[in-house]
Amino acid sequence: MIVEGEFTFQGPREMVWNLLQDPEVLAKALPGAKTLTKTAEDRFDGAMQVGVGPVTAGAFSVTVVLKDQVAPERFSMQVDGKGGIGFTRGTASVELRAAEGGDTLMKYRADLQIGGKIAGVGQRVLDSASRAMTKQGLEAVNRELQSRLTGAAPAPARSRTRYWAAAALALVALTIALCGGPWR
Amino acid sequence: MIGRSPPRNEDAALLTGRALFVDDVHLEGMLHVAFLRSDHAHARLIAVDASSARGRPGVVAVYTAVDLGDYWQPGPLLVPPPPIPGLTFHAATQVPLVKDKARHAGEPIAMVVAENRYLAEDALEHIVVDLEPLDAVVDLEAALAPGAPVIHQQLGSNLAAHVVQHKGDYRQARAQADRVIARRFRYDRGAAAAIENRGLVTHWDARAGELTVWDTTQAPIPLRNGLARMLGLLESQVRVIAPFVGGGFGPKIMMFYPEEVLLPWAAMRLRRPLKWIEDRQENFYATSQEREQIHDAELAVTKDGRILGVRDIFLHDTGAYDTYGLTIPINSQCTLLGPYQVANYDSEFKVVFTNKPIVTPVRGAGRQHGVFVMERLLDIAARELKLDPVEIRRRNYLSPDAFPHDHVILFQDSAPLVYDSGNYRPALERATAAVGYDGFQAERARARAEGRRVGVGIVSYVEGTGIGPYEGARVTVEPSGEVRVATGVGTQGQGHFTTLAQVVADVLAVDAARVHVVTGDTREFHWGTGTFASRSAVVAGSACHAAALAVRDKILKLAGLLLEALPAELELAGGAVQVKSDRGRSMSFGELAVRANPLRGAVRPGTEPGLEATAYFGPDRGSTASGVHAIVVEVDPETAMVKILRYVVVHDCGRVINPVVVQGQIQGGVAQGIGNAFYEQLVWDTNGQLKNASFMDYLVPTATDVPKVETHHIETPSPLNPLGVKGVGEAGCIPTAAAFAQAVEDALSEYGLEICDIPLSPNRLFELIRAAEAAGAAGAAARQTGGAAGAAKR
């Protein structure tokens, strides 16, 4: 399954990059994520609660291995997730580009295998709902960006590493692939 | 009684909910089973850790392949290939649990036994499986390409079989042809989608030393024999009961499914009864399917439409294992010849392993592929030669004096493909008359004037039925005067309790309601093979007939003694024997049965107690049924939806035992055929993941999609059995796709589209219409440009 698209943030690239380092912001974009632990320099293990359309939510363990990072422009990753309701595996890449009028264009592309119950029973909602959920998540990040541009929100926590952002974006890719409906 | 349609003996139990199905079996202390299945279509199994699952409350046992020890064995090859010269066949049969590699999504890896199904399923999530995914083999042509991932390493490639059969000299026929029609045809995979999924209850009675297995199988006796062998028991220690079953359609003849191997074994180990009922989602992965094939076929014809020869080269998908041998592709190969005179035939197929669930016969069992290819080639030939599609068939039918007709090649039962009897033109004429074919041009024009597009399709087919090896039956007249019949075939809704009763009732001159049939219980009867290949009426019916005749002889012999008359002076009527010339001198069957089992005195040498006899019937080869399907459709080119306006079947299954049962078989078969033609398709991604494993996305036709089929019977008796009957179980679904395609093309004749792929979903038809429109527009534009260029030249 190929999931690709782009999204325009109304704000500068550096700020978008920083924003994507804020776990509180990312939690809004990633409503399935429970934990995320750095287990090696370029590897993260996480736990999610995933449900797709008619497939009841189940525990889903995720491993993300980062590759080809060029901060703050792009990175790619190998993702591997599995649980009682199926699996997903493949690669994803994210690119941030400065756009006209001080905007930032995000391009994402994930090439994922989906298997098990989520593929067999959740198929009918994977495509359309993943688009809707991605949009929803990225819009949440964009809203946070707007409020920070107008100075209404606290500054992002500086202590977070950039891996947070990279791994979180991997989860965005997973979300794109898996979220077939409301997270339950 | 034969030829009539009395109320069905089984209906009272079925309609009032008293009939026993496997899931109705509840036993004291019964545990429930769930299976952990591979999410991957092709993956190496590195490790399974079930320790956490084993420790969960309510979990009694968890078994993996390693836990099975020596009991882990690949299943037997069910149908060895026929002795065709030069044949290549590589057996790779299914295993109880994945040991080294998962070869299709849904293949079981572990079995959980728990106090209830909920606890068993919850425990599945606590089994940790380490699978290393491998590239999957999904596409048939890619599977045979050099460098393709190999599913069974020991074979070195994904080729399961290669078979060539010839008749005559096709090359010479082709050289003499006025025209050669060549096309590629595809048929895709579907599920049998029985209402009742598979299920098992197993119970080991340690005191009696008896294992009882309730199973939705179509073949209780071979299952019993196989289980006894695997478990080291006497055959008599295993009792398999196939109670009422909610539809078989072929997949339930397949054995030994992993669940069938594992539940009896575990019940003996745990000394507790076990139950497993397949859920609908499991059914999409764990029950066998059919029917992907790709045919490259050509037809050599004369300019007046006479067939000189056919060549067909095809690929057949067997899925991850080939337990059922070559039955399906050989059916395709043989059935292609249809009711036609084909002097020269080259047929070659390759069977291919893929990372998809196992393929075994599903109603039709490959016959529909052959019919589709042949009928489509004839339709295209008729169009190109400007012949009427009905006329081209008429010109090529075998004549009534051509029987028995030897097609030279071998059939799936290893016997030569010889048609026993047939008379094809009357069915065609009856169908054309019934559907109003001669006046249909006017009908089409009238509809077109109203803005509607209607079309008609008429196709022919034969159906090889009633193959051996044999079935048996025991007929007993009880002291109550009631008659009991026990036979080994399983029953899945075909009406055996009535049709077999009618056969016996006819011989004994009793009401069919007084004949009580029991099927599918190995304690009642333990010789036989099962219900498949449209054979129950032919083979079990003939065995019932023979046993009833033997009982009739016993009745006449004993009554002759008691009534002091010669058997020839006696007649049977209304459950009694009477002297023809003096009907007052009579004895009821019940009285005779009591006298046949004396409490004092002696049973004389050369006689047996009771009014009971057992007999067997084994035909040398199958009998060939035939028929014509005619369909009228209306197609909306905007939405590509097809509405079936009429469906006429003229069927010849020899002598008809029960017209309503035959009609029911045809109605149900047509419903399945319509699903197969237009709605049902299992869709796989390139990794072998099924994308529509539910009835939300896998569309079976509903009552509103299936018309009432108008059925006509023609009777050309079979000379191969005493009843003159032929099978009818698969007739309804065999030619449906071919009829459907012809009618849709006819309705959309102005588009000039060709339907070569089945199922023809609304989506695919929509694409064909749009492509035809684009080609038509391009053609019109080209003509216009050409005309302009021509004008400019002048």
Image (cartoon, coloured by chain):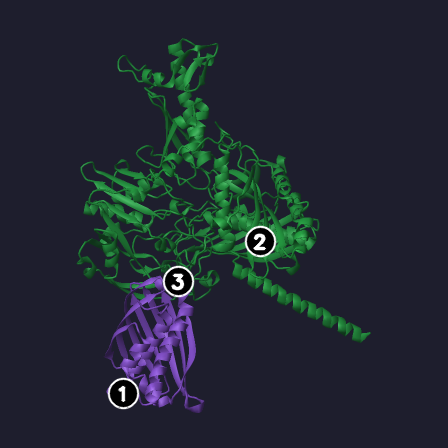
Chain colours: A purple, B green
How much space separates mark 2 and mark 1, taking CA atoms? 67 Å
| Residue B428 location (% of width, % of height) | 62, 41
Residue labelled with disc 2: B741
Q: In the rendered structure, which amino acid carries the disc numbered 1? A: Pro
Residue labelled with disc 3: B689
Q: Are discs 2 and 1 located on one and the same chain? A: no
Q: Secondary structure at mark 1?
A: loop
Mark 3 chain: B
Front of the two marks 1 and 3: 1
Mark 2 chain: B
Residue B504 or B366: which is nearer the viewer?
A: B504
**Circle 3: is it few (<14), some (14-19), or many (20+) Cα within 10 Å?**
many
Q: In the rendered structure, which amino acid carries the disc numbered 3? A: Gln
| Residue B608 location (% of width, % of height) | 33, 19
The answer to which of marks 3 and 2 sits earlier in the sequence is: 3
To which quarter of the image does residue B745 belong? bottom right
| Residue B432 position (above or below residue B106) | above
**Circle 2: is it few (<14), some (14-19), or many (20+) Cα within 10 Å?**
many
Q: Are discs 3 and 2 located on one and the same chain? A: yes
Q: In the drawing, does residue B85 fall left or right of residue B778?
A: left
Residue B622 seen in the figure: no
Residue B506 seen in the figure: yes
**Circle 1: is it few (<14), some (14-19), or many (20+) Cα within 10 Å?**
few
Residue labelled with disc 1: A154
| Residue B634 location (% of width, % of height) | 59, 53
